[in-house]
Image (tube, helix red, strand yellow):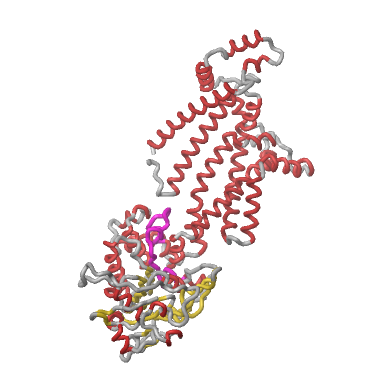
Amino acid sequence: MTRFIVRRMAQTVIVLVLISIFTFLIFQVIPNGDPAARLAGRTASPDQIRAIARSWGFDQPIYVQYLRTMQKIFSGSVVSYSQQINVVDQIRRGLPATVSLAVGAGVIWLLFGIVVGLLSALRPGRVLDRVLGFLALTAISTPAFVLGAVLLYVFAYRTSILPTGEYVPLTDDPWQWFRHLVLPWISLSLAFIGFYSRVLRGNVLDAKHEEYVRMARAKGLSGRRVMVRHVLRNSLIPIVSLWGLDFAGVIGGGAILIESIFDLRGVGQYAAESISTLDVPPIMVIVMYTGVLVVVVAALVDILYAYLDPRISLNT
Amino acid sequence: MSTQPPLLEVDELSVTFGTDDGTVRAVDGVSLAVEQGEILCVVGESGSGKSVMTSSLIGLTRAANARFSGRAVFDGVELIGASERQLERIRGAEIAVIPQDPMTALDPVQRIGDQIAEQIRAHNRVSKREAFETTVALMERVGIPQARTRARAFVHQFSGGMRQRIMIAMALSCDPRLIIADEPTTALDVTIQAQILHELAALCRQTGAALILVTHDFGVVAELADRVAVMYGGRIIEQASVTELFGDPQHPYTWGLLGSVPRVDRPRSARLPTIGGAPPSLVRPPTGCHFKPRCPHRFEPCDDVPPLVSRLPGQPNHRDRCWLDVEEKRRLRLVDGDIRLVGAAT
């Protein structure tokens, strides 16, 4: 276990170095990427631009710029180019919304994914399975921004059943927190539910034909016990790792579209805004933050996996 | 011969599967009886219906396109068409199953001991603790060292032979009256096949459980069986006590099987005799006797299905499905002093 954790921590460091270099370089080579020109504004003279470049250090060699940025990031003093506000503070401000979105949606898509997958697998090929399969494919192939827009139109603009967006902190008003997150949760979850249900359905149907399931029936176990203890227990293992990584992606600010449509002002929306203004420091921080989350969650998933499936060892 | 009714009496059991190519008659009117505590070996080549027959008895043939007819009475209870709930009570408790492949028959993510204990608890009102103690005792009984520790291990930590011992422990866990073992050693190393089978037979004798042993190994049959049923094309074509079958085999197919067993008293260079031709299609089987197309001794009556009856005076329980005259059979089957099936087949 110690060896596993040490190895994963080393991996995390390598991942961080690589993605930060990569992100930094991308913004060096894209057109219109010169931050001094952007900071100086549209009417600035070449002298003003040079002055800004000198004071921000944009005239230094790339590796110096990179190292300085990294140093600022790890001391927590990094500021954005556009608004010159502290990036770490800004992300901290966005986290409650992003975490609320991720946790709520993650629970919803896991539960419904399992339920829908089980219902499909119960009687494969029958009407219910076909209907659910069709709905799953529709959900998977509907872009989140289309779904979000439709839901907003129906539930917020036409009927005002639910608010149009924005995030209300849980500690301020739990009921409003919930009401404001219902549509984002649904918009984010549906495609995942579709995908998870299909994966689980396949797993359950495979497991049903396993010899150990037949043997479990031969032992005289009730159909219910065979289903829960043997079929489902084995079918859910891959779902666990899938969920861990998807959840890490969302909590790492990956739900950019959903956060923006519903104006949740979370980490994802911050990332979207920073990308549209080519604001390198926040982008770097968010990318690294996401990277850390994904690596850590992947490690947790692996530990859980080794616990759920005794054939997996952490030390190989 | 015992006067009590047989433990299991199968009467004209048929199992068919509807497919796009037509109806597959996997089991075609099988009748047999298993007495209390006896070992019945079912032999036959692959696809002769052995496995479908045995798994249908306990409702484990669950394909949606399967159709069953006939009867199978176990200790007064009709098995064919019994409700799932009734079968659950019988399976694992009264009739236990030992699977073909112990490699895949154990759940990879559950502890071995738990998998035995869950069967005990499915049929007996005992605490988890008691079920676990019984499990350890069973594992010791089937020869697993350090059973208490091993009960907490997982299946991937067991060798093939140990896994099959676990399956035997499982089968014995609720003191069944009948154990169905479907080629229980084909997936195992040759070196331990005989050992496992002897242990299984010995445990059956000890506990008084009857055993249906599906096999294609005539050596096993000769050593362990009380009685033998030979299956071909979904039918039983000969059924007898082991001495009757080996001493006076009646069906040409049985001669062929016996003749193709390797023997130490033959020169090594001699080719093993085989039965020409291929097993019958179960979708469009030959009319009459299923073995007719491969049988060198066929004649007109073979176009009608021969009934499974005793044709031998003095051997009332020796039944076969062959129209040939008994004396003629005794002459035809002897080739160079051995029982064999010789002659052209199409």
Above or below — where is B327 with respect to A251? below
Residue B252 image position (x, y, % from top left): 35, 80
Q: Quadrant of residue A119?
A: bottom right
- Nearer to me, B19 or A146: B19
Q: Of A61 and B148, which appears nearest the observer?
A: A61
Q: Position of residue B27 (x, y in %)?
A: 46, 75
Q: Which one is in front, B161 or A76?
A: B161
Q: Residue at the far right: name it.
A: A158
Kindly identify the residue that appears in the image at 40 percent across and 78 percent down.
B291
Asked if residue A285 can be seen in this view, the reply is: yes
Quarter the N terminus of chain B occupies: bottom left
- Please say whether residue B206 is visible from this viewpoint: no
Q: Position of residue B287 (x, y in %)?
A: 47, 81
For the C terminus of chain B, the image quarter is bottom left
Which residues make up the magenta segment? B89-117
> Which of the two residues, B116 or A118, is positioned nearer the viewer here?
A118
Residue B91 lies in the magenta-colored region: yes
